[in-house]
Image (tube, helix red, strand yellow):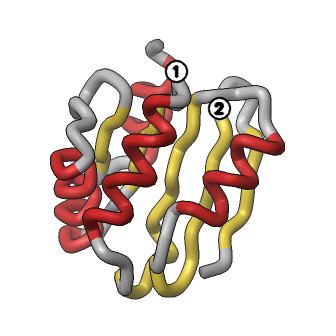
Amino acid sequence: MPYQFRERGEFLEVRLDGVLESFAPFVRDLIDRTGTKQVLLNLEGVTSVAADTYALASQVQAAVTEGYRLAFFAPRPALFGISRQTLLLGNVEEGTAAGVFRDIEEARRWLLSA
């Protein structure tokens, strides 16, 4: 699954493209590369999901435990639902350490409100 980092000042945007198989590859890069813990996960380019939602949930939970604040931009209904399910399965309280948004500007505002 290809991904790109875009530094946006106070937060980092990670754009995912193609088939979502795991969050683990870019999470490792993220931890190694950046100083910010505010991350916008842009799922706009995801075409399908081949990942186990419990595995995704575990990866999100680990990132939140490390102190990351995650905003998921999921404009399509299926990705929005999978993103919310991922938070629920990972016992990540939506609205505090992570949030799911259909509007990218709303996701950015939420990240910057911390």
Q: Which disc, if any, is residue 7?
A: none
Residue 92: x %, y % from top left: 26, 36
Q: Nearer the viewer, residue 104 or 30?
A: 30
Q: How many marks?
A: 2
Specify the amino acid type for callout 1: Leu
Q: Which residue is mark 1?
A: 112
Residue at image x 65%, y 32%?
Answer: 11
Residue contact between numbered discs 1 and 2, judged by CB atoms under 8 Å:
yes
25 shown above or below 69:
below
Q: Which residue is mark 2?
A: 11
Q: Nearer the viewer, residue 110 or 52?
A: 52
Question: How far apart are the alpha carbons under marks 1 and 2?
Answer: 8 Å
Image-quadrant location for residue 37: top right
Specify the amino acid type for callout 2: Phe
Image-quadrant location for residue 34: top right
Image quadrant holding the N terminus, namely bottom right
Q: Is residue 68 left or right of residue 32?
A: left
Where disc 2 sits, the SS reads: loop
Residue 73: x %, y % from top left: 40, 53
Residue at image x 46%, y 68%?
Answer: 44
Residue furthest to the right: 33
Q: Is residue 100 left or right of residue 107?
A: left
Residue 111: x %, y % from top left: 48, 27
91 shown above or below 49:
above
Residue 72: x %, y % from top left: 40, 49
Image-quadrant location for residue 105: top left
Mark 1, other Cα within 10 Å: few <14 / some 14–19 / many ≥20: few
Q: Earlier in the sequence, mark 1 or mark 2?
A: 2
Mark 2, other Cα within 10 Å: few <14 / some 14–19 / many ≥20: many
